[in-house]
């Protein structure tokens, strides 16, 4: 599937969703942004500590090994989220989706 061009959808949250849903969406967005900046800050600190010699390279590789061991569980967690999202998308009539998104929804469902 290849798409060259642009597409957009003007989403007015207050018209398309209830206020409780808007609050939930903004809270989740804030949580995601906080996690992203936290991870970036942690990564920069880790690089600084390796460069200055505060962190042992062996400890760094041990942490990498531990992360790789946790990876299969995280992949399964992503699978569960994808199944949940597809379940939610499947509850809506395809005609309520914006015309530019309908082909993608049909391809996924």
Image: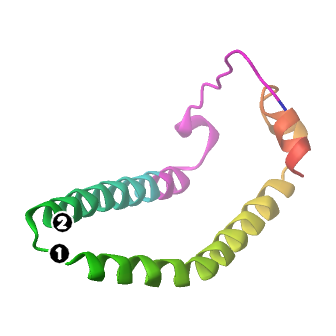
Q: Quadrant for residue 4, please give it.
A: top right
Can residue 93 be spotted in the picture?
no
- Provide the secondary structure element on which disc 1 rests: loop
Name the residue carrying label 1. Answer: 55
Instruction: Tell me the distance, in whole angstroms, between the alpha carbons under discs 2 and 1.
Output: 5 Å
**Residue located at (82% from left, 38% from top):** 104
Q: Give the range drawn in magenta.
A: 2-25
Residue 48, percent from left and from top:
15, 59
Q: Which of 74 and 105 is in front in this view?
A: 74
Q: Residues within 10 Å of mark 1 (few under 14, many from 20)?
A: some
Name the residue carrying label 2. Answer: 50
Is residue 21 placed above or below 84 in the rendered structure? above
Residue 63, percent from left and from top:
36, 80
Residue 81 in the figure: left or right of residue 40: right
Q: Quadrant of the N terminus?
A: top right
Circles 2, 1 touching at the beta carbon (< 8 Å): yes
**Residue located at (77% from left, 23% from top):** 3
Q: Residue 40 carries which label?
A: none
């Amino acid at each position: 599937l290849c798409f060259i061009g642009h597409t957009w959808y003007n989403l007015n949250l207050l018209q398309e969703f209830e206020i409780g849903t808007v609050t939930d969406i903004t809270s989740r967005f804030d949580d995601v942004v906080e996690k992203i900046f936290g991870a970036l800050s942690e990564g920069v600190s880790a690089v600084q500590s390796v460069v200055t010699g505060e962190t042992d390279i062996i400890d760094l590789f041990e942490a990498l090994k531990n992360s790789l061991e946790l990876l299969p569980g995280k992949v399964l967690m992503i699978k569960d989220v994808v199944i949940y999202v597809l379940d939610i998308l499947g509850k809506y009539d395809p005609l309520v989706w914006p015309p530019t998104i309908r082909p993608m929804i049909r391809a996924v469902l």
